[in-house]
Image (spheres, helix red, strand yellow):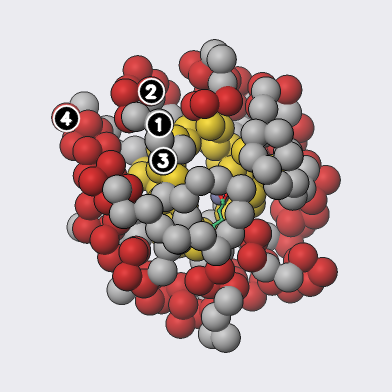
Amino acid sequence: TRRVLVSPSLLSSDFGRLAEEVRAVEAAGADWIHVDVMDGRYVPNITLGPVIVQAIKKVATRPLDVHLMIVEPEKYIEAFAKAGADILTVHVEACTHLHRVLQQIRHAGARPAVVLNPATPLSAVEEVLGEVDMVLLMSVNPGFGGQGFIPHTVDKVRRLRAMLDARGLHTHIQVDGGINSETARLVVEAGADVLVAGSYVFGAKDYAAAIHSLRA
Ligand code: DX5
Ligand code: ZN
């Protein structure tokens, strides 16, 4: 059985105490740190850019897992890689030339990943499975923390794992949105191995207990 990685989403952290929050989730057992970049155009919310990623990089010891919810991501790949993003995830729906953007990410020195919204079929990434280190399946519509998990995602994870197995690929499958101890178990059983969790981790009194319960 594959090891399950937990990537707490800073979106639900206390941004006034960002450095402390990063240290706290790392001490609590976070494997990666999930950073949500929103531009107010691709999604109806605005968060942060490369300067904040750079600030997080100064305190983080775990890989920065940067989820770009922005239009024209190709314009900002180098800036986020330079700021310290280890994994750069782009939305297939936001890329006119997805293959080119994935290559651009690798050339910039980061690990390329691609993400699909709940309504986007797996066929949208079928031709680039060999180019990515991870496929992220959104289990909510992107833009906000604290939304409910869309149950249909479980079957989508299962079908993606089968597609990867058929090609002999060990690509990570990440799930983002509405993850708690119950939904975590469902998606891990279906073949996911990286869990993003925002409100479930940062809303808990005990970060370590919350992270541990996602792996259990
Ligand atoms: C949503 C973001 C998520 C968000 C998840 O657009 O991509 O990473 O922080 O939050 P929860 O875990 O609260 O659903
Ligand atoms: Zn995210």
- Helix or strand or loop: what does disc 4 sit on? helix
Quadrant of residue 122 within the rendered picture: top left
Where's the N terminus, which quadrant? bottom left
Left or right of 158: which side holds 68? right
Q: Is residue 92 above or below residue 20?
A: above
Quadrant of residue 22 within the rendered picture: bottom right
Q: Residue at x 55, y 80 (%)?
A: 204
Q: Amino acid at mark 3?
A: Pro
Q: Earlier in the sequence, mark 4 or mark 2?
A: 2
Nearer to us: label 3 or label 2: 3
- Helix or strand or loop: what does disc 1 sit on? loop
Tell me residue 155's x, y (percent): 23, 46
Tell me residue 121's x, y (percent): 34, 29
Q: Is residue 35 above or below residue 98?
A: below
Any mark on residue 124, and which?
2
Q: Which residue is mark 4?
A: 166
Tell me residue 35's x, y (percent): 63, 51
Left or right of 144: which side holds 211? left
> Are discs 1 and 2 less than 8 Å apart at CB?
yes
> Are discs 3 and 1 less than 8 Å apart at CB?
yes
Q: Amino acid at mark 1?
A: Thr
Q: Amino acid at mark 4?
A: Ala
Q: Residues within 10 Å of mark 2 (few under 14, many from 20)?
A: few
Q: CA distance from mark 3 to mark 2?
A: 12 Å
Q: CA distance from mark 4 to mark 2?
A: 17 Å
Q: Which residue is mark 1?
A: 120
Q: Which residue is mark 3?
A: 118
Nearer to us: label 3 or label 4: 3
Any mark on residue 134, and which?
none
